[in-house]
Amino acid sequence: MSEPDLPQTLVHLAQTFLVLGEEIAAGAGLTPQQWAVLHQVGAAGGEGVLPSAIAEASGTSRANVTKLVRGLTRLALVRVGSDPADGRQRRLRLTPSGARVLRRLDGEKARRITAALEGLAASERATLHRLGSRLLSRLGRRLLA
């Protein structure tokens, strides 16, 4: 592969991962954005997370987060409760159903990516991981857990 083909390949790979995420999320009746909110709420654990923190971390508006949370609440995947330290603040927490859906979606994503990587030798997977991590670091992004 020539050097000019590399950016095009990386863009195509990113688009393919986006479509994969859309397919997996749609299978659960969610949008990729709702799945991303589930991730952020799940990462906060039992302490919960403020909607404003989700908006800031995802680079979206509070109004958009409110809309996404409303949908997740209707689906009984997220519950909204008060902040013990400041009753005026609202904290988002996963419901047991939300935790199950998140595990299922993440498991499906891991299975599909693992299946795609099966044709690579262990050394190739290690090199891909190392170079992908370096590229993400250079782009100012962290690997998602």
Image (cartoon, rainbow, N blue to C red):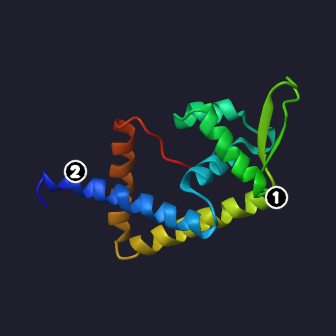
Q: Residues within 10 Å of mark 2 (few under 14, many from 20)?
A: few
Where residue 31 appears, x then y in whole percent? 57, 57
Which element type, helix, strand or loop, lies under badge 2? helix
Q: Quadrant of residue 134?
A: top left
Q: Quadrant of residue 61?
A: top right
Residue 76 position within the rendered picture, expressed as x and y whole percent measured from the top left: 79, 56
Q: Which mark is residue 119?
A: none
Quarter the N terminus occupies: bottom left
Q: Tell me the distance, in whole angstroms, between the alpha carbons under discs 1 and 2.
A: 41 Å
Residue under the image location 54 percent in, 37 percent down: 58
In the figure, 119 relative to 142: above or below? below
Residue placed under numbered mark 2 in the picture: 7
Q: Position of residue 62 (x, y in %)?
A: 63, 32
For this rendering, which residue is in front, 30 or 118? 30
- Looking at the rendered structure, the kind of residue marked 2 is Pro
- Which residue carries the number 1 mark? 96
User: Dot 1, crowdedness within 10 Å: few (<14), some or many (≥20)?
Assistant: few
Q: Position of residue 54 (x, y in %)?
A: 63, 36
SS state under label 1: helix
Residue type (three-letter) at the residue carrying disc 1: Pro
On screen, 43 above or below 49?
A: below
User: 7 or 145, which lies in front?
Assistant: 7
Q: Which residue is found at the position 49% from the left and 71% from the top?
A: 112
Give the vertical position of 60 relative to 13 (above or below): above
